[in-house]
Amino acid sequence: MTGTRATVRRSSAERRDNQRGWAWAMPTTLFLLILFIAPVILVVVMSVSKWTLLGGDTGTNFPDNFTKVLSDPLLRQSTWFTLKYTLLTTVVLMPIALGLALLVQEARRWNNILRTAILLPSALGIASASLLFYALYSPQMGPINPILARTGLMDLSSSVLGTPGGALWATVILVVWRFAGYYMLLTMVGLQAIPADVYEAARIDGANRWNTFRSITFPLLRPTIAMTMIMSITGSLLAFEQFYILTKGGPNNSTMTVVLLIYKYAFETKKDLGMAAALSVLVLIALVVLNALQLRAMGVEDEED
């Protein structure tokens, strides 16, 4: 009888714990449902519907939205440009962020000033930073054109953003300036998580700086590098504001990104939300697959196992 009462008390306590747990999890669950799950479901529904900007939903349109998107030559052009921009940004940004983190990781007076200076551009939103660089690149009022004209790299009457190559590199410089401090900060957190006694043991064994970096810092920093690379690549693949403000996808659609194309499908050239949603679904699937491949390639899953 005593055992039965104890079992009943345990069951009641477990039930109360479960109810308490559900009560704590409910706000987060509702948050996720409203801000993530519901929009994704809506986009999937729109992708298989004939849904114009002003006409609303007028019925199912599967698979026409997907076939129209996949047969658009502008999609191939924008995909190639987005991949090129992502590669360039990642190749330039990641080593700079790692180098800056290694440079200022030690707690010194001047390093604190340097950290603050490097991190300051991250306080600006990407749209604000793009407007600032738009003014700097402007042939009428910006200082970049006269400098390039004096060095003979371009005519004074030309614009940095007026050629495909110039527009691409001008945007890469903007993104590196805006995000280098942010990724430096994330990398510094990874560096400070490495135990100091590992470095002390390497120093006693006579390891120089390069051997220490190659054998200790880089392997132990790999999860942090994987995370920052995923964030950088995902952000670059979803680039929109900087190109919308600086180039509008020009000249001649040469800087059209995939997300900018989604915007143009929805609000400018096609005014077709169904096509825009279909392309959004394709981008979402590509990003999920790419992130899974990145994690596997960086060996993060193996380390966790």
Image (cartoon, rainbow, N blue to C red):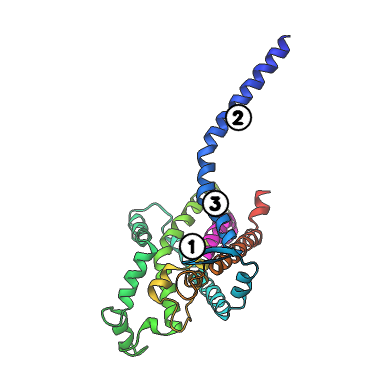
Q: How many marks?
A: 3
User: Element under label 2?
Assistant: helix
Give the x, y percent position of residue 299: 65, 57
Which region of the structure is painted magenta?
A: 211-235
* Circle 1 SS class: helix
Asked if disc 1 and disc 3 are in contact, CB closer than 8 Å, the reply is no
Q: Relative to 26, is 164 above or below?
A: below
Marks 1 and 3, the one that precedes in the sequence: 3
Picture quadrant of residue 289: bottom right
**Residue that label 1 marks:** 98
Tell me the number on the disc at residue 123: none
Mark 1: which amino acid? Answer: Leu
- Three-letter code for the amino acid on which mark 2 is drawn: Asn
Nearest-to-viewer mark from 3 and 2: 3
Q: Which residue is mark 3?
A: 38
Percent position of residue 238, x then y: 51, 66
